[in-house]
Amino acid sequence: MRVAFQKKISTKLAKQTVIIAFFVGLILSSIQVYLDYQEHEESLSHAVDQMIAVSSGSAARAVRTLDESLAKEVVNGFMHYEFIHSAEIIDDLGVQLARSEPGTASEIKPSRLTEWLVDADENYVQPLKVSQEPEAGFGKLVLVIDWDVALSPFYHRLVYVVTSGLVRNMLLALILFYVFYAALAEPMHRVAQVLRKVNPINPSGARLSQDLVERGDELGVIADMTNEFFASVEKNIKQRDSAELRLSDSLLQTREIIDNVPHPICARDTEGRFLFVNSSLAEFYGLDEAKMEELNQYELHRGINEDQSVELEAADRSVLRTGESCFIADFCLTDHDSNLHYFQTSLVPFTYFGQASVLSIMVDITARKQAEEKVIELAFYDALTGLPNRNLLTDRLDLEMRRAERHHSTGALLFIDLDNFKGVNDSFGHAVGDQVLQHVAEQLKGALRAVDTVARLGGDEFLVILPELSENLEEAKLSAQSVAKMLTEKIATPFFVKNRDWVTSASIGIAMYPNDCNNVNEVMRFADTAMYEAKKQGRNKHVFFEIDMASRAESAYSLENELRVAVAQNQFFLVFQPQVGVQDGVIQGAEVLIRWRHPDRGIVPPFEFIPVLESSGLIYEVGKWIIREACYYIRKWQDLGLWHDEAWLSVNVSPNQFYNPVFVDDVMEALKEAGLSPTALELEITEGIVIRDTENTIKKLELLRSNGIRIAMDDFGTGYSSLSYLKRIPLDVLKIDQSFVRDITVDPTDKAIVEAILSMSKNIGLEVVAEGIETEEHYKFFKGTSCQRYQGYLYSPPVECKRFEDMLRERVVA
């Protein structure tokens, strides 16, 4: 410990002496200053009185005679004295005759000391008698004193007295300090320096110098006894250090190893108090390592998770009771941030400095557990819906089929496919499609039993396992049918996605196991086949698998492969059915139809392959090709002079083609490549397109019409909401379906329907085309109406390009 300068003995003695000398000197100096001030003040007053006495006569004469030059001379005479700031003479009427101008600032600002000593605002005023008359007035001689200047000699003496007193006291203090330091403080300071350097734990080699020991006074006795004490302490410390060094090295090495282990390690006594912890465990609890010691882990963890704390305490009790180690392969603990961790934990009976305790070593396996769970989830569950995927489904289906055989029971597999889901993705994007799939998955999960399994196969396909419905096949079918009907209704429930209401439907195929088959892949294929049959029957249905469906499915699969070859090898061609003016019989346009020239089977009817084009998704490419070919032929016939500008070709549009996001771009690109006006093309849509998504359909039709393309409603009258939609849809033409035309001459109902359509179309400004005109009676009926065009076998069946060109030439010649 270092002694501060102001606390040293020599300093204290010198300070006390100086203080006494200072006060004595202060008193003497004050007396001297007071006497000097009295003497200076008297001298100054005497000097001013003499100046006034000398000048008052001249000043009075100047006032009496009003002699300004004399007055000026008098006041200027005062300015030879530095302490006179200004002088002025005022007559008996208070008028200033003369005033001396100050040599410095016009305003006096005395120092604080001057203001304290004298009244700085006090001036010398000498009355001046104007005349000897008793009633005569008085003038004034006013002297303004600059007291700072007047007292400056006194101030100089004051500074000298104070400074000399301070210097005297300082010299006295230094002399006394040196005397006291040499006689007393220096020897004690040497003792203090030696003691300050002594290490209290190991004072090895610390000794006071021999000259201090030999002084013979009190300091010498203290020095001698201190040296003896040092020698005794050194001996004891060497013995202790030798033992502690070995123990300390061992503890430090052990602690360093434990702290660097990346696993929580601690020792707990029989009550659960920490005896030591490493940094990993301190980090787990979010506490400082030093603060954790003496804390009770049972109580600490009880604030996080009481059940885990009870398990931890029970495990410790078991180890302490049996005296045997314990290994827990999967022990759960929650950290201070409420994160659950999994540990492989070893609990070992342990003696810590003679105290019974439990050594706990924990290895965090949380990341490994999470990775294992993620692998299982990715392998067996669908990422989008969280449902089991194909892998888990096939495992469960195989298990349920084996159980059904053992228990002689019947189960069902339902194959669910959403209707027109591709159109949702194409029209609104995959983000909306994903939300629709998630909604359907939730509906399916919420509707089924706990023993049932619902899985997503992929895309918009779901599978449902209904195990052990009944031992009786018919009863099992009834149960499966009931579930299928219920699921159909659930899926069809309106729901809200992306700020709009949605309604979807599903087709369901049902296969019974083990009756239909006892093979997992086969029963899945049979349910898939039944689902496609449900779609053929109009969608939003459920159909049980029947054995003849398998052969039809194989045929459909074969046909689909042949169609893919047909698209690649350009086996399709177009035919044209003329549309003729009812009144003049002139060809005004034609409907474009597709045909397939099969290399082995010849011409394949459209009703055989068009549904397969639709279901396989090939219809988009084929439909795009039809529009391009139609534009090509129009361009060709215009160049040949066979096609006038008011004529058009009418092309049927598939729903899947229409709802493709780039459909309008495809149409406009085909017209642009052929160099055609958009009015040369007419697109035929069905009511099914409108009903599927009315708002988007109307927007797309308005876009097509704004570009000049004509829009026709094909098969009008066969839909269930024709009139309600008609007023909203942007149309140019209505085509009366041939089912109304066929019996129009014999069936009053068909006739009434056709007449109503014609009347309505005329009122709202739509053209009408009658389809299926095959007899003269049909023609005569429509000739007497407002129908503009007709087509049918009466005039011509659909013909190939060459024959149609001949018909156009005949029209031109005619």
Image: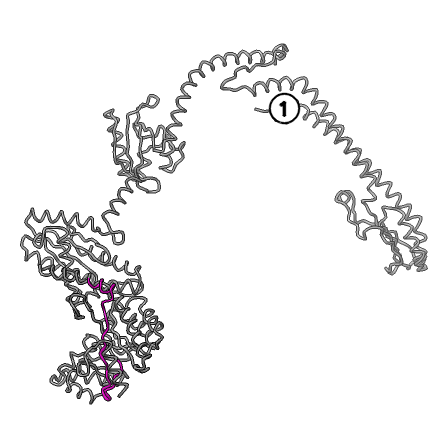
Q: Is residue 154 left or right of residue 263?
A: right
Label 1 amino acid?
Lys
Residue in view at x 31 percent, y 59 percent: 431
Q: Is residue 90 visible?
A: yes
- Give yes or no for residue 586 being in the magenta stretch: yes
**Hey, which quadrant is residue 748 in on the image?**
bottom left
Q: Is residue 151 above or below residue 680?
A: above
**Hey, which quadrant is residue 566 in on the image?**
bottom left
Spot occupied by residue 432 in the image (x, y as percentages of width and height): 29, 61
Q: Is residue 218 visible?
A: no
Colouring chosen for the image of the structure: one colour
Spot occupied by residue 187 in the image (x, y as percentages of width and height): 63, 17
Residue at disc 1, secondary structure: loop
Q: Which span of residues is magenta-colored? A: 562-589
- Give yes or no for residue 772 being in the magenta stretch: no
Please name whichever residue, 250 or 488, is drawn nearer the observer in this view of the structure: 488
Spot occupied by residue 194 in the image (x, y as percentages of width and height): 58, 18
